[in-house]
């Protein structure tokens, strides 16, 4: 087999990583739901679970032991929120090492991160900050994605952001930025349909054109979540992950899966947590939509 430099780890060996089934539907494993999954026996019926990487970087204590036990029974997707792939300074080595350790410990079936930056020097910001859509930014993100993939020994998925304003100086549209990033690095895409809908509302992204132009073969996962109106009024939508998936986002999901078939899907909820059964009901709705795809 001919080696591809993008997939080599530091031992110069190609690592084979299993992929989730295309029709898997899961939920984000967040603190309020941990106890429901921690004890073997009456496990909730769900195909897979997603965790935020940084919540488990401390490789000790009951929380980590519980995740290890859960990972023995459920496939786990590791979703990073602070790798800061858009940083011109590159990726923090310690952050990447800790991500690598977690991914290895849980045998992650999927690893993903955001098209964003969140670090300046040693300072981390509690947010996913936007990138200018320029050639220089594309160069920086491409270097960081290639470095991360080489270190992890696997492809990672990059998530499209929620957009609240258009940064000046852009030389390309978001969908073109993502296409070029896939071409340069061989990365995959995590398509967050709530983010796409929020961006369409806030800055006029044409979601149908976006779906027409995104490289569908690179889509390895779909996220569904909720949004809310800006508390200060106006037409702005905020990507809160604190409410049910809206009917508009469900319609986008039906449209995308009609076009490309099923893809592994995660229902995200990060605040205003409902009972677990409610969240599992949303996962069932996604499964029903996938079942309608011919």
Image (cartoon, rainbow, N blue to C red):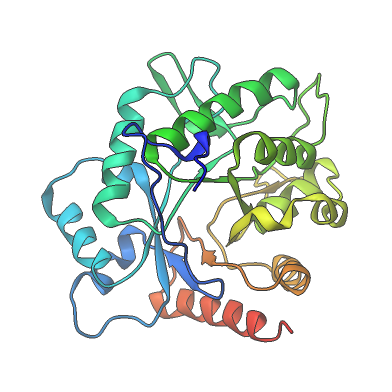
Q: Is residue 240 left or right of residue 199?
A: left
Q: Is residue 183 positioned above or below 294 on the image?
A: above
Residue 230 lies, in percent from the top left, at 68, 46
- Taking the image as shown, residue 230 lies to the left or right of residue 207, namely left
What is the quadrant of residue 130 in the picture?
top right
Q: Position of residue 101 (x, y in %)?
A: 26, 42
Identity of the residue furthest to the left in this view: 61
What residue sits 69% from the left and 39% below the top? 183
Q: Is residue 261 visible?
A: yes
Res 164 seen here: no
* Residue 13 vertical position relative to residue 271 in the rendered view, above or below: above
Q: Residue at x 62, y 85 (%)?
A: 288
Q: Position of residue 149 (x, y in %)?
A: 46, 37
The furthest residue to the front: 1
Q: Quadrant of the C terminus?
A: bottom right
Location of residue 38 with respect to 127 vertically, above or below: below
């Amino acid at each position: 087999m001919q080696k591809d430099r993008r997939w080599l780890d530091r031992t110069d060996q190609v690592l084979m990583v299993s992929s989730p089934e295309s029709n898997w539907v899961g939920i984000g494993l967040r603190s309020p739901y941990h106890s429901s999954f921690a004890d073997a026996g009456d496990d909730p019926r769900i195909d897979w679970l997603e965790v935020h990487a940084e919540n488990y970087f401390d490789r000790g204590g009951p929380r980590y032991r519980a995740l290890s036990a859960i990972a023995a029974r459920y496939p786990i997707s590791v979703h990073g929120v602070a790798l800061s792939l858009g940083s011109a300074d590159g990726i923090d080595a310690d952050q990447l090492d800790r991500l690598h350790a977690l991914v290895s410990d849980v045998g992650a079936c999927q690893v993903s991160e955001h098209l964003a930056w969140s670090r300046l020097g040693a300072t981390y910001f509690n947010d996913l900050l936007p990138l200018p859509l320029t050639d220089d930014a594309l160069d920086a993100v491409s270097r960081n994605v290639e470095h991360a993939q080489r270190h992890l020994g696997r492809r990672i998925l990059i998530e499209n952001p929620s957009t609240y304003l258009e940064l000046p100086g852009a030389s390309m549209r978001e969908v073109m930025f993502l296409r070029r990033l896939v071409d340069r690095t061989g990365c995959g895409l995590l398509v967050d349909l709530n983010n796409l809908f929020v961006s369409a509302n806030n800055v006029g992204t044409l979601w149908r054109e976006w779906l027409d132009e995104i490289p569908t073969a690179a889509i390895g996962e779909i996220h569904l979540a909720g949004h809310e109106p800006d508390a200060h009024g106006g037409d702005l939508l905020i990507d809160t992950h604190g409410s049910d998936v809206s009917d508009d986002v469900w319609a986008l999901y039906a449209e995308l899966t009609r076009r490309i078939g099923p893809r592994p899907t995660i229902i995200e909820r990060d605040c205003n947590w409902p009972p677990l059964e409610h969240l599992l009901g949303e996962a069932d709705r996604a499964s029903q939509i996938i079942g309608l795809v011919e």
